[in-house]
Amino acid sequence: MADYNNSRFAPGAAFPENAIEVSKQDLEPLLTPAQLKVRHLFGIPLVSAVKDPITGKPHILTDDMVLDIINGAVSTAERELRIDLFPVKRREKQPFDINLYNQFGYFQLEHRPCTSVDKLSVTPSNQLDVYVVPNDWVEGAYLNRGQVNIIPLTVAFVQGTYIPQQSSGGAAFLQILGNRAWIPAWWQIEYTSGYPDALMPRTVNEYIGTIAAMEILSMLAATYARSTSHSLGIDGYSQSVGTPGPQIFAQRITDLQDKRKRLHNKLKALYGFKILSGTL
Amino acid sequence: MLLGARMLIDVQGVNSFEVTPAAEFYAGDPATVYFQLIDQSLDRSIDGFNPPGRRYMPSPGATLNCVVQSIDDNKRVTRFATQPFANDPSMWALQFLASDLIKGTCNLYLTLTEGTVVRSGTVKCAIKIHANSGLNLAGQGYSFNDQPA
């Protein structure tokens, strides 16, 4: 696990972005099976239409199974949104780029929402640090969107040792870099992405719930596939019944699909990048 | 044998309790979380068992070390669980203190020691600790001066 005693945190919360005070409670732990049923599957019995041929009883989708589907939906949501929902500590290598370096050591991290930079260093492939940038110089103002800068305008203390600001000799190592235009895998950044403590915004839980509900309805609908109509005739009397069959939840699934798309775009806009440009 | 646990609420005794997918309480509240050890490889959901898993009663003198997982070392809770009912050793209780910093959605990792036999188990998203305010700032609980308040 990770030690955050010397980390540089974002100035405010991951959600609402950079908030430091709120009047409304909008964070909650991961969706529970009960919440999923209330929010997305109200009135739909989680029971298969086909009975077990041996016991004669219908299969029940238990809370345990629903929880497993929710956990699967979390993984799907993370892949679709390309953000981390549960906290993940990462180690990322970035090249030295003189153009970015001249813009106060601009770094764009790969994973968002980023909540802390735990270590920024120059570390070769043998994993022995050549130089560790003092955390006092690491600017985390735009961490939520994955941007990190080095701003060595203040004095820094590292293990009790005074390191002067950029105008003095303490940052000479960084200044030497001005002679090179580009060096691959020069920087190593350790950081943490995902919502702290896996406390999700309600919107994210809605998204996870939508994915899980679609999966559940799809599974249940398959058990209605046996027939779409039946008829019964006795002498001169007859009765026919038509049912939607496997299309029974089609309208609800379509509604959820629309909601999923809307939420996807909103969340992607909040933390993702649709356009990325670089200097190479 | 695949060690696991089912979370319990409203525990009055060995015959009086309810099963829940996750134990829930608010951060900062002292709480006791009850759970029952099970063998997850038996009596599975697909075979029609609800709740799934067969109760597992460890041998006398067994100890159960619990880790309530957080990515942050300072928030992670590592503590021994106790057996609240002598006549049902499958039931265990885990105490949370008001001073515990942990919150959010947490996995529960179990290490059951029965003599020389040590078994590990995991319960995913077993404990959900709600934030007691609308905010959850990364780094809360630290003292150095550049943390958010």
Image (spheres, rainbow, N blue to C red):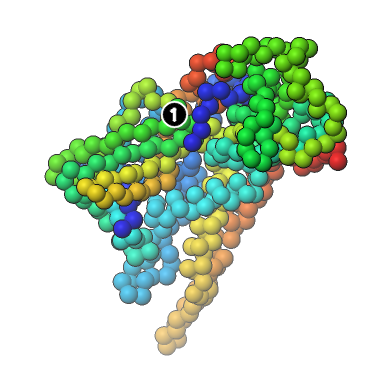
Residue that badge 1 annotates: B75
For this rendering, which residue is in front, A197 or A266? A197
Q: Residue A200, image x and y in percent?
A: 54, 36
Q: Is residue B57 left or right of residue A104?
A: left
Amino acid type of the residue tagged 1 in the rendering: Lys
Name the image quarter holding residue B108: top left
Residue, far left: B87
- State the image coordinates of residue A199 (x, y, percent, origin top left): 51, 34
Of residues A137 and A23, the one drawn nearer to the viewer in this rendering: A137
Instruction: Name the residue at 65% across, 45% down.
Output: A81
Query: Callout 1 environment at 10 Å: few (<14), some (14 to 19), or many (20+)?
Result: some
Residue A125: x and y, percent? 67, 41
Q: Is residue A267 visible?
A: no
Looking at the image, which residue is at 81% across and 34% down? A97
Q: Which residue is at the front of the view, B95 or A175? A: A175
Chain holding disc 1: B
Drawn side of residue A14 relative to residue A280, left or right: left
Q: State the residue at coordinates (73%, 13%).
A: A165
Depicted B92 relative to depicted A25: above or below: below
Give the vertical position of A209 relative to A148 (above or below): below
Q: Residue at x 61, y 23 (%)?
A: A8
The single residue placed furthest to the bottom in the displayed view is A235
Q: Determine if residue A170 is in view.
A: yes
